[in-house]
Amino acid sequence: MRARSLPLNLRSATTVGFAFALVGCTAELSSDSGAPNGPGVPGAPTGSGGSVGLPGSSGGSGGTAVVPPPAYEPPTGALRRLTRSQFATALEDVFGVVVDRTLLDSDNYSGDFAAIGAASVVTSELGAERYLSAVEAAVDAVFTNEVDRAELLGCEPAAADDDCMRGFLATVGRRAWRRELETEEVDQLIGVAQTANTELGSVIEGARWATVAVFSSMHFLYRAELGESAGSAGLRIGGYEMASRLAFLLYSSLPDEALLDDAASGELDTSAGVRAAAERMLSESAGRRSVGAFAEDYMRLDRVMMQAKDASLFPEYGPVLQSAMVRDMREVWEIIAFDDDASALDLFSTRKVVANADLARVYGLDATGLSTDTFQELALPDDGPRVGILGKLAFLSQFANQKEGSPTLRGKFMREALLCSPVEPPPGDVALELPEPPSDQPMTKRQRLENHRTALQCAVCHALTDPMGLPFETFDAIGRYRTTDHGLEIDTTGEFEGVFVADSRHLGEVMSTSPVVAECLVRKVYSYAVGHEERDVDETVVDALNASFTASGYRLKQLLLDIVTSEAFASVAPAVD
Amino acid sequence: MKPLTRRTALRGLLTTGTAVSIGLPLLEIMLNESGTALAQTNTPLPPLFVTWFFGNGTLPGLWKPAATGSGSAWQLSPQLMPLSAFKSQLTVISGLEGKLVVSGLEHPTGSAAATTAAPIDGVAVRAPSIDQIVADAIAGDAPFRSLEVGVTPATPGGPQDSLHTVSHNGPNSRNNPEFDPRAVFSRIFGGLEPVVDEDAEQAAKMATVRRSVLDSVLLDGARLQQRLGAADRRRVESHLDAIRAIENRLDAPESELSECAELVAPSIGPDVNSEAPPGVNSVMAELTTLALACDRTRVASFMFSLPAAHVYYRHLASNMNDDFHDTICHGDPGDPSSQPRVDTGVLYTMTCLAEFLTNLQSTAHGAGTLLDQALVYVTSDTAWGKVHDRTEWPVLLAGKAGGRLRGDEHHNFQSENLSRALLTVAQIMDPTVTQIGVDGGFTSAVLPGIVV
């Protein structure tokens, strides 16, 4: 991570000299766990054991000497497994089924994104079984429906190896594998069709099982982005590899025929061609997923579906509400980016929600006309306490246990994910005493966490997290609004980057004007899009993206277009053996 | 506890919806006269291995027995009392230190220390876990190389792989536990139902068709590998190994144990409230026992709870409705001999372990029981959870490992590396293993006086 300026309260701690002895809890340190996983990348990340970023220390690009940033170096070409979201969306697009993502092999969250861990993850035996089951079920859904089947096949094969079958396999294969199939590959799939035809006495069964083979293949499940030689320009990603890369970023799914045709005709070998394709994709409804899928990965919406809450305290909590929370978060990101074409920072101040009846009730909105299955865009009241993505249940409930919200965990997510400023883990050998206060002497959570702010060894880190998390105490363990905690009025004040905030609404408004938040968002979208953690040698690329993002008024569509047309998106280095 | 007679061995074992009419899992005619080896091949009975893992540690002052020795020389400690019916089968190892534990990352590094003998690197472990090391040696021709199940999915949700499972094939290669008993049943026992002739013919055709699909997948994989660097080739190879195993299972599963084909699926679903309910433990214990008895696998990881599990044992007492990790282990005042709510949780955990050991003990196997043939490695991701003590790590071996363990022993190895327990376990299951671990977890010194 590159250097960050310190918050004011930490500078005062350093003049005492105490914090200097505690190497942890400064903004610059990467985790102490060494080099990241994934493809070998030239240009190792900074911060691994390096600069602590205290004022006056050397290291990072925050010093006073003017050192030109290193030139960009491409990362090693990677083999990425489709994320759960991409696998499911691809099957949903082709076969019209709904795929239960939670049954699929877990994503790897190296680099805090499934999109990055995809380059490292190894499939387990159970995972392999689950992919096969999901594919069989998806193919079955179409092949047992005459209309859908006819539409998929596009013709009626009379034999397992006739032109219709060959043409079908070549077409569906090209879409699934994101490239033209070799003759011997089509022959191989024809072999599967023939076996099925022989055993089961049906050419249609032949087509079915050959389709299963196509989508069970490593060529579907894994994305090889290895580049092709471009002479002195190194390895370039173009043609079909670029189509695949664009589609999984902007559609979270397979490329469509138009994009595959672009690839075949060489359109995607130039930045201008990529821009034209990307603009088209972002104007389509599937292009909204570019932002929705990013939000899902970034805000770890997968974790929302895995949580449990105390049923007696939160009877309204369950799979219906959990799914609604996830949809609300995803769709509001998409609305801000596409329908409103607004600044991304508006995400922190927006009143928009997408709610079904269950969610509307928790938000205190009129649920008339809504049911569990119908969702509508609604608006929270302007004078209400709840704003922005941090006012949504998918954030609030995620950083909470079964009974109470956690100001520290909420604040930690904000600092790490939204301000790009890692927080060291707590020292594990501290004997923490947080006894439940006696029922006749209740305390608010803020009061119970007082030690975190007064004991200096705790305050060093908690000063970075709690002031941002405490304003959200007005939202409970699932995100319902409340004004009291254990019967006592909640103190909603806090601080964001040195600015006093009266409550979480004020906090959202301050964040919606913060260039620090905008800059961090650029870095996060970039690393997600290129599928690797940010390195020293990415600095020039990120700086350019930042300038363009700012100039555009923080438009996410612009950021995505800039990323996909950048040199970084089209360059890889050779694999090591 | 003496093994029950053949007819009653497993009847009544399964009280949670899986009806059983099974007798001796290994028919006597297949064994040699002393019941120690398969008659036709004279190969010894396969040994069996289970990692039985629980999160959040113990109260070392109540876990560690006072005296060392064997037989009457030592007594069970308070937290081991739920295992009193199995004292003769227990080898308690105390005093070990988790030297790989890193401050701030105690739970992921502790989990990795106790199961892989290696540090972690970012989110990844750096070595395969003990169950996979053992599987290399003993998985043999069992249809499943290993089985991973869990009772409660409660987790802090952090990114490290070692928080989400204790079974790893290597870096970035998790074997995640299955938490839904119905899914475990259908995976392990599905397809074993006896089929009438017409169905058998159809089943054979489907197997042929699926085999041709998988062969196509294998060919694709090999072609892809040609373009890749070494590391990515290995990742694809792991996936192709899985495809091969799946394909092998397509061959008509003629279980010699027809009783294993008459099992009824459980109706209990997973723990959706993060409570580790007794019903889920019971059915998972039974399913694991059956998987071993029916030779579906010889290696299992039973994750009662995950590292740092945020489990709510609200069914144990009205004062237990709190986050066991954050609120109870870390927040409750006390010392390594006294945190009453922690004690309640640990005692419940040991009661759940006792149920599994009962199942193994109740299942005849060769001349003895499954428990006689098994090594159950019981451990956790920390010692005293409140301050993440890395000394007095809980390590318990249950079972006689086919005669390689005597049982009824407590050994103390004060301040020795926890990895030495893993090496000892590995060597019991595979005498050719002489070293284990990485960097600070590396050892080539087995713990003395344990292996027969």
Image: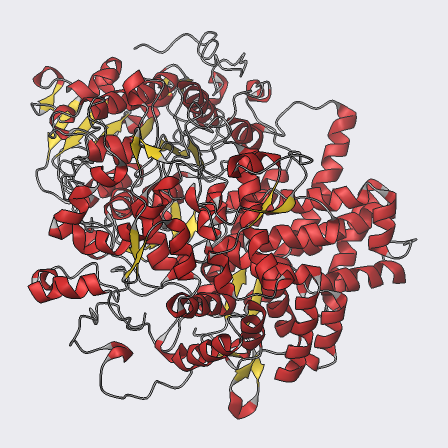
Q: Where is residue A208 in the image (x, y as percent from the top left)?
A: 78, 48
Does residue A307 sit above or below B343 in this rendering? below
Q: Position of residue A542 (x, y in %)?
A: 43, 77
Q: Quadrant of residue A201?
A: top right
Does residue A307 sit above or below B354 in this rendering? below
Residue visible at 54% across and 20% down in the picture: B266
Relative to A97, A573 lies left or right: left
Q: Where is residue A514 in the image (x, y as percent from the top left)?
A: 40, 66
Q: How is the image coloured?
A: secondary structure
Relative to B67, A286 lies left or right: right
Q: Which residue lies furthest to the front in this view?
A: A383
Relative to B94, A562 lies left or right: right
Q: Is residue A428 visible?
A: no
* Number of numbered callouts drawn: 0
Residue nearest the observer in this picture, B441 or B119? B119
Q: Residue furthest bottom?
A: A232
Residue nearest the observer in this picture, B93 or B324? B324
Q: In which quarter of the image is the C terminus of chain B?
A: top left
Residue nearest the observer in this picture, A92 or B23? A92
Q: Where is residue A569 in the image (x, y as percent from the top left)?
A: 53, 76
Does residue B317 sit above or below B133 in this rendering? above
Residue visible at 17% across and 66% down in the picture: A11
Q: Can residue A529 be seen in this view?
A: yes
Q: In which quarter of the image is residue B407?
A: top left
Residue nearest the observer in this picture, B401 or B267? B267
Relative to B352, B386 lies left or right: left
Q: Quadrant of the N terminus of chain B?
A: top left
